[in-house]
Image: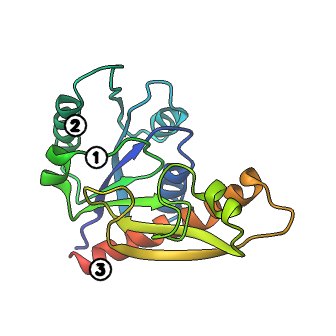
Amino acid sequence: MRVTTRVVVLLSGSGTLCQALLDAIAAGELDAEVVAVVSDQSSAYGLERARAAGVPAIAHPLAKGGDREAWDAQLRDIVAGYEPDLVASAGFMKLLGPAFLERFGGRTINTHPALLPSFPGMHGPRDALAAGVKVAGATVFLVDAGVDTGKILLQGAVDVSDDDDVESLHERIKVVERRLLIRAVSEWKKEHP
């Protein structure tokens, strides 16, 4: 009997990447189960998407001026409670700290709207446009202690149009990002049976 990959998704916003996973699972295109969704934003719409799909949705905000190390250890414990095979950071806008990575390093993936190692950080599409590149894209990588520095697993290119602005480019990148995330979760099981 085939064992389904158990995934915890971390997100901060609308949850479109998470929704892509949920849709692929529901369509039978992905042998995985999203066992929980955790957000650092109590108002993240991605939590509503999780609830609508019957997935546990947990808000774990970091209070302004709060203890970052304690928050990170609590996040580790929340995620550990769902016994995931894989953690997918999908639009999660907080860096994962040492306590989390000690437990889930090597099995936490992240998506980024740029072709790493170019344009790491919060503004990949904006930085790509500012640099005048003709090709942008998305990357899925293994999370490490750096900022968007982990081992690259998958990449997909997006041509930059002369009339692109940050929003139009980012929307096309998101389409590729969703596809890559689904593929990365699918391939994870093959490589980590």
Marked residue nearer the N-terminal end (2 or 1): 2
Q: CA distance from mark 3 to mark 1?
A: 26 Å
Q: Nearer the viewer, residue 157 or 177?
A: 157
In this orientation, does residue 30 appear? no
In this orientation, does residue 49 appear? yes
Read off the residue under disc 1. Answer: 96
Q: Is residue 34 above or below residue 181?
A: above
Which residue does the image show at 46% across and 72% down from the upper left? 183
| Residue 53 image position (x, y, % from top left) | 48, 42
Q: Which of the image's four quarters has the N terminus?
A: bottom left
Read off the residue under disc 3. Answer: 190
Marked residue nearer the N-terminal end (2 or 3): 2
Instruction: Please state which amino acid type lies under the numbered disc 2.
Output: Asp
Q: Nearer the viewer, residue 88 or 4?
A: 88
Residue most extreme to the front: 131
| Residue 189 image position (x, y, % from top left) | 29, 73
Residue 108 horizontal side relative to residue 42, left or right: left
Which residue does the image show at 73% across and 50% down from the upper left? 167
Q: CA distance from mark 2 to mark 3?
A: 29 Å
Read off the residue under disc 2. Answer: 72
Instruction: Please state which amino acid type lies under the numbered disc 3.
Output: Lys
| Residue 140 image position (x, y, % from top left) | 43, 67
Label 2: state its secondary structure: helix
Q: Is residue 117 above or below residue 38?
A: below
Q: Nearer the viewer, residue 38 or 29?
A: 38
